Image (cartoon, rainbow, N blue to C red):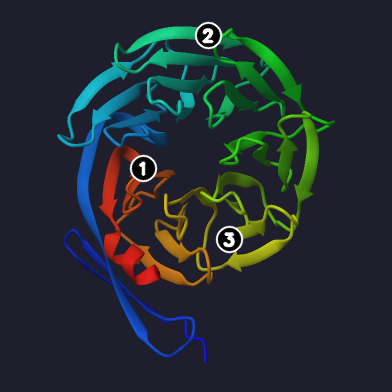
Amino acid sequence: MKLSLLLIRSLGLLLVGIVAHPDGQRLLAQEAKLRATFKGHAAVVTYVAVSPDGKTLASTSYDGAIKLWDVVTGKERATLKENTSTFRCLAFSPDGKTLASGRQDKTVILWDVAKGQELATFKGHMDRILSVAFSPDGKTLASGSDQGTIKLWDVAKEKERDTLNEGVHSVVYSLAFSPDGTILASGSFDEAVRLWDVRSKTLKATLKGFDGYIQSVAFTPDGKTLASGGGDNTVKLWDVTTGKLRATLKGHTDQIRSVAINAQGGIVASASDDKTIRLWSVSSGAEMAVLNGTDPAATALAFMPDGTTLVSGSNRTVKLWDVSSVIKVGK
C-alpha cells in the first residue's frame, strides 16, 4: 500500500513534514529549518545563484539590482547595478570568478565577482534575456530570450559563437547544461523541453507531455535525469538518454516557478505560486517534505554545494533552509 499522507506543523522557524515511505511500511519524519534570511532587495527576487565554493550567494530582483551576499556572515558584500534595466537571471562560472546576468534590455553582462565590476557586455538578442547558463568547462555561455532564440557565446573571445532555434520561436524561460557539457536543455513557453546537441548545434530531442509552459529545468549530477517544472503544477522527471518520461510528481496546486537538484542527485526541490516548496525523492518520486513558510511564494531556488542547504528567493528576501534531515531520510 502506498500512502501519501502529509502533516505540516509550523513551529516558529521549524517546519515538520510527515510522509509515508513509498513501500507503505514505515513512516518518515523530516525537518526543514530556516537558517537565515537575507534582506535588502526592494522588490520580488527573480533569481538566485550560488558560487561553486558555497561562500557567495547572488540574487537579482525587479528592483534592478544584483546583490552579492556572504553566506557565512549573512552580510551584503556588494550591489551590482549598471543602469536602470532589470536583471532577470544569473549564473556563476564554474571557477566562481565570473557572474553572468541577463537583462531586460536584451544584453548579457559578465561581472568580476571579486571586484564587483563589469567585465563584458554581449549584444545580439532581439528581446529580453530570461535565462543564462555556463558550460561545465566555463568556455561557453548560453543565453535564452523572449524572442525564442538561444545564443552560445565564446566567453574568452567575448563574442557570439552560434544561435540555436531550429524554427523554434517561443520564449526560452530556462537553460541548463548537462554535467558533461554535451547537451543543453531548454524550457519554453510552447509547453516543450528541448535537448540540444552542443557539438553539432542541432536539436537532439523534444520532450512533450505538458499542459503548460516550462519555467525551469535542472539536470541530476550524473546527467541521466532532467527535472522540469512549470504551468501544469507538476514536476516531471525525464530519462535523458531515451527522452521518455520517468515520473510526474504531483502535489502543487499552482504553477511551479523553479526546480533545483542537490549535489548528491537524490532530492529535487520545487517552488510554486501555491506558497510551498516541496522536496521530492529523485529515485522514487516520493514527496519527502513541504516547506510552508514561503509566504509570499518563492520564485527562485538553488542548492548550496553541500547539498543540504536550499536557497529560496521571494518578495524582497532570500532564505537559507537546512534540509539535512530530509536528505538523510531520503537516502
Could you tell whether 174 is left or right of 13 in the image? right
Q: Mark 3 vs mark 2: which is more N-terminal? A: 2
User: Is the residue marked by circle 2 packed among few (<14), some (14-19), or many (20+) residues within 10 Å?
Assistant: some
Tag 2 residue: 121
Q: Amino acid at mark 2?
A: Thr
Question: Is 315 in front, or is 147?
Answer: 147
Q: CA distance from mark 1 to mark 2?
A: 28 Å
Q: Viewer-proximal residue, 206 or 317?
A: 206
> Where residue 234 is drawn, which disc sits there?
3
Label 1 crowd (10 A; few <14 / some 14-19 / many >=20): many
Q: Mark 3 belongs to which amino acid? A: Thr
Question: Residue 282 vs residue 165: left or right?
Answer: left
Vertical order, 140 against 323 (above or below): above
Q: How far apart, in angstroms, are the residues tagged by discs 3 and 2?
A: 36 Å
Viewer-nearest residue: 94 or 230: 94
How many residues crowd mark 3 within 10 Å: few (<14), some (14–19), many (20+)? Answer: many
**Residue 231: x %, y % from top left:** 61, 52
Earlier in the chain: of badge 1 and badge 3, it is 3
Residue 164, percent from left and from top:
75, 27
Left or right: 90 in relation to 140: left
The residue that disc 1 covers is 314
Q: Secondary structure at mark 1?
A: loop
Rendered location of residue 245, percent (x, y) = 70, 62
Tell me if label 1 and label 2 are in contact, CB under 8 Å. Answer: no
Q: Residue at x 32, y 67 (%)?
A: 328
Dot 2: what SS? Answer: strand
The residues tagged by marks 1 and 3 sit, at their Cα atoms, a distance apart of 20 Å
| Residue 212, position as x, y percentages in the image | 67, 52
Mark 3 or 2: in front is: 2
Q: Earlier in the sequence, mark 1 or mark 2?
A: 2
